[in-house]
Structure formats: C-alpha cells, structure tokens
Image (spheres, rainbow, N blue to C red):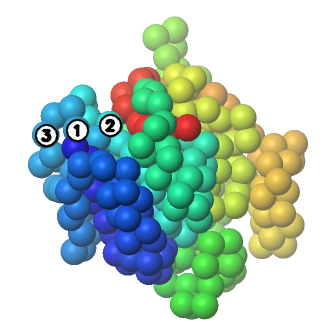
Amino acid sequence: MLHVIVNPVAGRGRARATWPKVRAGLEAAGAAFDVQETTGPHHATALAAATPDGATVVAVGGDGTTHEVAKGILGSARTLALVPVGSGDDVAFALGLPRDDAEAALRVLLHGRTRTIDTGVCNGEPFLNALGVGLDAEVGRLVHDAPPALRGVGAYLWAVAVALRDHDVGRMRVTSRAPAGDAVLHDGPSLLISVQNGPRTGGSFRFAPSASVDDGVLDLIRAGDLSRPGTLGLLPRAMLGRHLGHPEVAHHRVTDLRIEAATPRTWHADGEAFPPATSFSVRVRPSSLRVRAP
C-alpha cells in the first residue's frame, strides 16, 4: 500500500495538474494506494505521521511538501518517495529523480530501489537538502511572493533582487565542533551561510557541487563581505558550481557546528522560512531516512 500525500498548490498548481496522470499510472499498474490532499501548512507532517510504520509515503509536491512529509516519518521504518512538481525540487535533484516527467517519476515509485540517506537538523528542525542563514534564507522567504508569471529560477532571481534592495552583511561566527576540540571556521562579515546536504539550492544554484546525501557530512558554504554588484556577479558562477574559488567564498565539510549572529538573521530549512534567530546549532544525522530512488 502506497500512502500518497498531494499538496495541490505546489509548483503553483503543477501538483494538481500532474497527480491525475500519476493516479492513472498507479491504477494501470494495479498498485494499491490511498491518497490525501493537504489543506495548509504542516498538514503533510500530520498526515505522514499517521501512516502505518513501515509504510511508503509518497510526497506529491515540492521541497516544502517533501520537508513536511519527511518530518513526519523521520525516526521510523517508513520510506519516503517523491513525485517532484515544485518550484525548485532540490531534494529530487540530490536523489537523481526526474522533474517534469510524471511517467519517469512513476517508474521510480513502482520499481526504484530503497536507499538510506543522511539528514541534518538545526535548532531541532530537520532538513533534507539545505539550511541557510542570511541572504539565501531571505530569498527563500521572498520567492513565495514572486509575480505569478515567474517560476523556478525566474522567481528566485526576482527574490534576489528584492533581498539585495535591503542588502545587509551581518557579522557571524561559525564554529565546527568535534571531540578533539572546536575550530573557529569564520568570525566576521557574512552575506550568507548555507549548510548543504545536497548539491543544489534555489532550483538552479549549485552551492555545493560535490555534496552527497549519503557521505555522513554536511557541506558548509560561506559567502563573506560581498557588495550588491559583487553578489550579482557571483550568481552566474554559483549556477554553474564555479563559485568556490572566489576569495569571499569558503567551503568546509562538517558534522556538527554552531553559527552565532551578531543580530537576528532569517533562516530556512529546505526553503521553509523560520523566524530570525541569533544562534544556530547544526549537525548531521547519518543514514537517518529511507527513500525511494532510481
């Protein structure tokens, strides 16, 4: 039995349009399934948590839906499966899942393999793909307000332009924690700090090109004291994953870290925005989630 959770508004309606095709494919294959639609924020978490232990729970939506469903099944023997129809679908990208291809997603759903991946947690909030503090989080918050005609990278670039209007490079201290002792990785101006489990964020930006969801570490990407023009100039390089050689960009692999901000900073987990905070405790949870993948 597949337990399907559909977010009908994901991808600005793409989920609602795609689900009938997936339903028809499941019925043609003789698959047993039930389906429920979400009605608002956090509903997917409650629906996922109510499924039987050992169930395969299918998220039909984007990264936000995937985040909520995963939150409801972490720590159990359930398996997460995806039909990616969101604006970014960065979790699907990290797993090698196809976007905008209902038939391919259906094949993975029915015939894919089950694997175990790492997840991260920040201040008690889990994330599958990325945690961001600073500009990246502000962009993630704004992207939901993008004009309806803009989708994907267009909506993200619109949000970047709006966020840069109130450009603020705050001071942040980043400490990597380990049994052998703590190490200060940075203490100074930081435009943004992104902690990646997967390689991509924002639907198009390869912040951590070599990141893997099953290597037991998180990839910390920090952008330092960048001006507005400097930030805009760096974005095309970030889309190609060629930004790591920039003098204001640093890359570290970590398992446990603390981020302390001089002033409250907006933050996100898998694109979901949370109230500003000044302290962030982040760590990896190795091999903590079962997923269906190609």
Q: Is the C-beta separation of discs 1 and 2 under 8 Å?
A: yes
The location of residue 174, given as percent across then percent down, is: 56, 38
In the rendered image, which residue does mark 1 sit on?
A: 55
Q: Does label 1 or label 2 sit earlier along the sequence?
A: 1
Q: Considering only vertical position in the picture, is 38 above or below 106? A: below
The location of residue 218, given as percent across then percent down, is: 56, 32
Can the viewer see residue 98 in this picture?
yes
Mark 1 lies on a secondary structure that is loop
Q: Residue at x 49, y 66 (%)?
A: 85
Q: Amino acid at mark 2?
A: Thr
Pointer 1: residues within 10 angstroms few (<14), some, or many (20+)?
A: some
Can the viewer see residue 130 in this picture?
no
Residue 162 position by quadrant: bottom right
Q: Residue at x 43, y 51 (%)?
A: 82
Q: Residue at x 38, y 71 (%)?
A: 20
Q: Amino acid at mark 3?
A: Pro
- Of residues 198 and 159, the one nearer the viewer is 198
**Image quadrant occupied by the N terminus:** top left
In the picture, the disc for residue 161 is: none
Pointer 2: residues within 10 angstroms few (<14), some, or many (20+)?
A: many
- Of residues 51 and 222, the one nearer the viewer is 51
In the rendered image, which residue does mark 2 sit on?
A: 79
Estimate the spatial distance between the alpha carbons at disc 3 and disc 1, rounded to whole Å: 6 Å
